Structures are given as structure tokens and as C-alpha cells.
Image: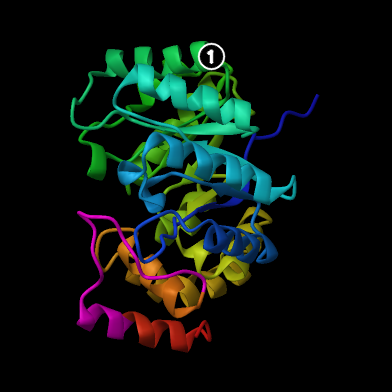
Amino acid sequence: MNVQPRFTGTYVALATPFLPDGNFDETAYRRLIDHVIDGGVEGLVPMGTTGENPTMKNDEHQRAIALAVEAARGRVRVIAGSGSNDTDQAILMTRFARSAGAEASLSVTPYYNKPTQEGLVRHFSTIAEKADLPVVIYNVPGRTGSSLAPETLGRLLADPRIVAVKDATANLEQTMGYLRAARSAGRADFSLLSGDDALTLPMISIGAHGVISVVANEAPRAMSDMVRAALAGDFARARELHYRLLDLMQANFLESNPIPVKYALSRMGLMGETYRLPLCEMSAANKQKMDRILAALDLV
């Protein structure tokens, strides 16, 4: 039996649109989902960092997941953001994601309370056991203050419901450690997904299987084509697309994500430029930089 990685390709970390009054804009959300699916991506990831999940109320969070599954209509796969620094809350949200029809959950390493590696093992193992949905661990130490060690992943991979890592460490040695841990655990179904658009190409070159992408909100066709080319071993084509997108990848982090990408999507007519505090609009100087990049890519 030829076992393949569970998730490969480009998954979009969906931005969440708001109406001018601050309420969830479901019409724009559906429009964005159609835009990225038409652009050829393999999947949707609602309610991650790019989705401004910290300021989404539980009912809004659940609605965003359910709507993503509904709008996808089986055309692409859905990995639902359901993490928390409270294990019980993560279990509740992951159970909802399962009931809504998501294929897996995206569960971040707990932030602020900074668990030990043993605490991380217990946290993710308990979610997998009690929610009974495949778990994609999201490791982003720059935001959380905690980081999953490769040895800890090796322990977690004894549970077949731990299926992937979204690696936003910007540390290729750690990426290789994750891939080595999966090999040692005999987990040919394990997926390593880049959590940094600009590092996706080098990560694929050492064995990663795809990306959970911010830039795929704006340029889904180019990003998904780049990833597919790299996975097929056509690195000349992948490099061409990588460098075409690199300025936009970097511009998306001129200020805290998702501020720049939401501005770009507003300029593209896909959603309004509305945030929830403590996030706010991008500076005028950075808007000018983004405008130039969007124009160069014929996105506006």
C-alpha cells in the first residue's frame, strides 16, 4: 500500500471580511472563497491568524468555519482553525469543526501560558483523543512564546490523529527535524506545511508538502502553480513564480498580519478595509508600497 502525505499543495489562510459596522461580512467571505478556489488552491483554512480569530466571538468563529465548509461545496478541503491556549476550549471548537464537516483542525501551540514540552504533548494528545478530528499542529513561536520541539513531535506522532505541522518557525533546521521525526515514526502520511510564504519553496526542496498561505488570498493561481511546480520537481518554473510573488509575500508583513493582506484585498474589490481593534488600518506609506506591488502584478 502506497501511503501518501495527508495534505499537499496550497491551503489558504482565509482573511475574514467585516462590514463597516464591524459585523462579519458573509457575502464578501463567500466572494473571497470563490476567488481562491477559482485560483486553483487545494484547500481553505478559516479562523487562523489571518482570519483575526482572537477577536471573533464563539458564534462568529463557528459560523466562519461552517460557511467555509458550505461554500467549498466539496470542491476543496477545509482545515478549520480551532486552537486555544485553553485545552478544554480547543476541544469544544474542534468538536464543532468536526460536526461542521471540516476535514481537520488547525491547533496552535498555546500562547501566553507557555507550556513545557510535556504540556504540549498532553495538550495536543487530549484534543486528538477527545475531539476525534485529525490535528494539524500550528507552530508559530514568534506569536505564541512556545515552540514544539522535533523530539516532542516524534512523541505525538504515535497518535495517528496528529497528521501535520504548519511550520512557521523560519528555521529550516527545525523543519528538517520535524521531517526526520516523521520518518523515524514511520509516518508516511504526515504532512509538513510551510507557515511562511517566502520560505515555501526552500522548504519544499527539503521535503515539505505544501503551504498554508497568506499570499494565496491575493494571488491564488500563481501561488498554487508555484507549489505544484515545486512538488513536481520543476524548480525552474517554481523559482520563476516565487520571485514574481516575493515582493507581495514580503509586503503582506509590512505590518502585522492580516493588516496588509486585508488592505490589498480591499483594493482588489474583494472586501472592505475593516479591522477589529487592536488591529487598525495600514499606514499611508505602506499603503503606497502595497499599491505599487499590486499594480506590478496586475492585481489592481
Whether residue 152 appears in this view of the structure is yes
Q: Position of residue 2 (x, y in %)?
A: 78, 29
Whether residue 169 appears in this view of the structure is no
The residue labelled by disc 1 is 159
- The answer to which of 138 and 66 lies nearer the viewer is 66
Residue 162 vertical position relative to residue 18 in the rendered view, above or below: above
User: Among all residues in the image, which is located at the extreme front?
Assistant: 21
Left or right of 132 in this view: 40: right
Name the image quarter holding residue 126.
Answer: top left
Left or right of 204 in this view: 155: left
Q: Position of residue 223 (x, y in %)?
A: 56, 65
Left or right of 69 in this view: 168: left
- The answer to which of 263 and 20 lies nearer the viewer is 20
| Residue at 44% over, 58% down | 197
Q: Position of residue 107 (x, y in %)?
A: 42, 31
| Residue at 24% over, 58% down | 279
Q: Quadrant of the N terminus?
A: top right
Residue 243 vertical position relative to residue 11 in the rendered view, above or below: below
Secondary structure mainly formed by the magenta segment: loop
Q: Secondary structure at mark 1?
A: loop
| Residue at 41% over, 63% down | 19
Looking at the rendering, the stretch of residues picked out in magenta corresponds to 270-289
Name the image quarter holding residue 17.
Answer: bottom left
Name the image quarter holding residue 117.
Answer: top left
Amino acid carrying mark 1 in the image: Asp
- Residue 168 in the magenta stretch? The answer is no
Q: Residues within 10 Å of mark 1 (few under 14, many from 20)?
A: some
- Residue 280 in the magenta stretch? The answer is yes
Q: Position of residue 119 (x, y in %)?
A: 28, 15
